[in-house]
Image: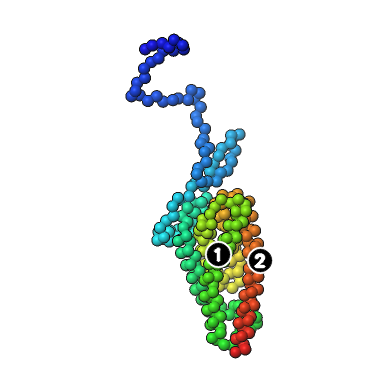
């Protein structure tokens, strides 16, 4: 033991086997950790005059699942997204995205939709042809039109998906979204496929089916807003603007596409009546 000639304090040797624990001299507990997680969405909460930071969404899964396992988990993911709609839910699922599972879902959905549409044409024959007040008398021509509409529906669904999704992605980037096209495509299929199949089945019901289909489409808009919020880390207002503007542009495009379709069908009917 010796005394420091400059400070007057006594220097005592330290026990090398005892670890010293630093104590808070004022007895004040440390405040909450406000360091943001690597991925999340923050919101400010006021609590008795003190501002605290809370994060609603945990980091998503880092790696996608193998294709076989991803397909097995799709039903539970569909159910979770439809019954627990929120940006938090989509943030939990978006980390599982991969192009393999996106294409598997998209091709499967296109094939199922084509089959259901063909069955609908058998139950409700000539839904498009009756628009013109007449139908071709040639049964072969009727079958060709049915098969043409059915087979053409598969690539049309895939093409329309990428067009609509690409438009939403572009609008999200305009609003400074941070997500990827892959993650947005994946999350959109999680609700788009089950609701799309349900819409086809409901459309078979006269009158009531149209009303229920309208409700499903409104619910799809709500889910798309949550999806955009999660993927692109946007606020609810910006995500809503992205979705509504995308729908407005799509309506204009669909209008011109329907005019073209009517023209083609009318041309086919005219050829059938001539022969």
Residue 203, quarter of the rendered image? bottom right
Instruction: Identify the residue at image location x=55%, y=76%.
Output: 149
Q: From what the image shows, is residue 31 above or below residue 196?
A: above
Rendering coords of residue 275 (x, y %): 60, 89
Residue placed under numbered mark 2 in the picture: 252
Instruction: Identify the residue at image location x=48%, y=61%.
Output: 102
Residue 200 appears in the rendering:
no
Between the residue at mark 2 and the residue at mark 1, the CA separation in whole angstroms equals 16 Å
Q: Quadrant of the N terminus?
A: top left
Q: Are marks 2 and 1 in contact (CB under 8 Å)?
A: no
Rendering coords of residue 121 (x, y %): 54, 77
Q: Residues within 10 Å of mark 2 (few under 14, many from 20)?
A: few
Q: 252 and 42: which one is in front?
A: 252
Residue placed under numbered mark 1 in the picture: 161
Q: Residues within 10 Å of mark 1 (few under 14, many from 20)?
A: some
- Which mark is first along the chain, 1 or 2? 1
Q: From what the image shows, is residue 143 above or below residue 166?
A: below
In the structure shown, which secondary structural element does the residue marked by tag 1 occupy? helix
Instruction: Identify the residue at image location x=60%, y=57%.
Output: 170
Residue 139, quarter of the rendered image? bottom right
């Amino acid at each position: 033991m010796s005394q420091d000639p400059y400070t007057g304090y006594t220097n005592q040797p330290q026990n090398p086997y005892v670890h010293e624990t630093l104590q808070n001299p004022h007895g004040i507990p440390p405040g909450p950790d406000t360091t943001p997680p690597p991925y999340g969405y923050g919101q400010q909460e006021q609590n008795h005059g003190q501002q605290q930071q809370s994060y609603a969404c945990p980091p998503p899964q880092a790696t996608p699942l193998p294709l076989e396992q991803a397909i097995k988990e799709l039903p539970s993911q569909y159910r979770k997204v439809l019954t627990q709609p929120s940006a938090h839910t989509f943030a939990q699922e978006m980390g599982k995205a991969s192009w393999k599972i996106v294409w598997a879902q998209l091709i499967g959905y296109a094939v199922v939709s084509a089959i259901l549409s063909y069955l609908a044409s058998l139950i409700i024959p000539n839904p498009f042809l009756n628009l013109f007040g007449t139908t071709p008398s040639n049964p072969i021509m009727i079958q060709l039109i049915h098969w043409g509409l059915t087979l053409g529906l598969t690539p049309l669904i895939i093409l329309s998906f990428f067009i609509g999704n690409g438009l939403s992605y572009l609008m999200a980037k305009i609003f400074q979204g941070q997500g990827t096209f892959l993650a947005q495509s994946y999350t959109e299929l999680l609700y788009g496929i089950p609701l799309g199949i349900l819409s086809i089945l409901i459309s078979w019901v006269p009158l009531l089916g149209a009303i229920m289909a309208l409700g499903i489409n409104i619910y799809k808009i709500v889910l798309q807003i949550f999806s955009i919020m999660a993927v692109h880390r946007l606020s609810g207002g910006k995500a809503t603007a992205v979705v509504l503007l995308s729908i407005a542009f799509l309506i204009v495009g669909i209008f011109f596409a329907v005019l073209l379709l009517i023209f083609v069908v009318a041309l086919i009917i005219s050829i059938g009546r001539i022969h």
